[in-house]
Image (spheres, grey):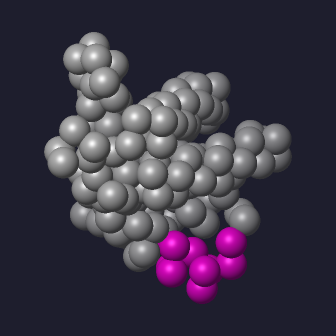
Amino acid sequence: MDRVRWMGREVARFLLAGVFLWAGGGKVLHPGFFYGDILSYQILPEAWAVVVAWYLPWLEIVLAVALFVPRWVGAASAGLCGLMVVFAMGLLSAWWRGLDISCGCFGVSSLHNQYGWWLLRDGVLLGLGICVGWAGWVSGWGEELR
């Protein structure tokens, strides 16, 4: 694989991992705030919101760390892409219903109703995840390590 494509792939992988480590870490540090953000979407009942508030941040962290393991890059990028789709659907639902929410994406935030920005960011991250997964599938993650 030529050096430029390899560097692009690695930069994309590290960016994606960094964003999800940051996002998961912010939520782990403030699960109560994240729980409140989940409730503000008015999608999940309280019992499920508790489960999501406790486990979703750890899933984000595990998937981000898995991006650093060549064998798991494809599965991790697919998992992160799936999360981005779910997040975007939640945002679109809240926007459609005119809810005044804080995204909850990176832990505590005072920003409300930034739907266009949040969806754009999610779209960019989804595209990055697709590129990371595709590049790994086409070139074979870890092939250069053998």
73 to 42, vertically: above or below: above
**From where the camera sits, is residue 94 visible?**
no
Task: Compare residues 136 and 67 and report the one nearer the observer.
Answer: 136
The quarter of the picture where residue 14 lies is: top left
Which residue is depicted at the point 25% across and 63% down? 29
User: x and y percent of residue 118 in the render?
Assistant: 55, 33
From this viewpoint, which residue is outermost toward the bottom? 47
Point out residue 59 in the picture as x, y percentages from the top left corner: 40, 67
Residue 25: within the magenta?
A: no
Query: Can you tell which quarter of the image residue 3 is in?
Result: top left
Residue 77 shown left or right of residue 25 in the figure: right
Q: Where is residue 74 in the image (x, y as percent from the top left)?
A: 45, 51
Residue 142 visible in rendering:
yes
Q: In this view, does 43 lie above or below 17?
A: below
**Predominant SS along the magenta part:** helix
Is 18 displayed left or right of 90 in the figure? Answer: left
Residue at horizontal 72 percent and vertical 65 percent from the top: 43
From this view, report whether residue 145 is shown above or below residue 55.
above
Which quadrant is home to the N terminus?
top left
Residue range in magenta is 44-53
In the image, farthest residue toward the front:
146
Name the residue rendered at 28%, 17% in the picture. Answer: 2
In the image, farthest residue toward the left: 145
Q: Which of 143 and 22 is in front in this view?
A: 143
